[in-house]
Amino acid sequence: MKSQRLRDLYGLLHKGRAASQEVLVQELRSAGHEVTQATVSRDLRTLGALKVRVDGELAYRLPDDVPSAVGGEFTARNLARVLNEFAVDIRPAGSLVIVSTPPGHAGAVARALDLAPVDGVMGTLAGDDTIFVATADAGSAKRLARRWLNAAEGSMSEHV
């Protein structure tokens, strides 16, 4: 029963029908599941769903859907928006940039970093709330960290 409920919830999230937990409760009840808001909240955590801003409105999305949800072709401006929304801390460490996020959000932010047109990024590795971004050298890491920190603080530079 729980596995079917999770599959149905996954489908609702993937279709973009998740403006709020209340909407999800109604949709899942319509599909025959006996759920409460608390059940949906736990299931959202289980699936790693994120609450993101889409077209000015908050909605739940799956981590793989976040970049497409914030705008068609992924641009530096989209990356700035993702960093502004989810980056808690950004700092260089040798040739790495360490990006901290709220728990469960690192995968989506790493995907945004992978999709964005950013020179100097060699690759990313995401855990639950931390991303290691590999760069060519310490100077590149410092420059990227500074740029991304500015973007996360709201300066929507096209040169993220």
Image: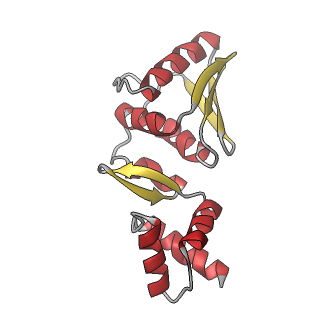
Percent x, y of residue 93: 69, 18
Counting from the top left corner in percent of width and height, residue 40 is at 56, 70
Q: Relative to 77, is 155 above or below?
A: above
Q: In the shown orientation, is residue 35 left or right of residue 83?
A: right
Left/right of residue 67 with respect to residue 129 in the rendered view = left
Q: Quadrant of the C terminus?
A: top left
Name the residue located 34 percent from the left edge and 44 percent from the top edge.
73
Q: Is residue 36 left or right of residue 56?
A: right
Query: Residue 52: image x %, image y %?
Result: 44, 50
Does 157 appear above or below 85? Answer: above
The number of numbered badges drawn on the structure is: 0
Depth order, front residue of 47/21: 21
Quarter containing the N terminus: bottom right
Is 133 in front, or is 89? 89
Q: Residue at x 64, y 14 (%)?
A: 137
In the picture shown, does residue 118 fall above or below 19? Answer: above
- Closer-to-camera residue (50/64): 50
Q: Position of residue 108 (x, y in %)?
A: 54, 46
**Which residue corresponds to the image point at 43% horizontal and 31% vertical from the top-left?**
117
* Residue extending farthest left: 55
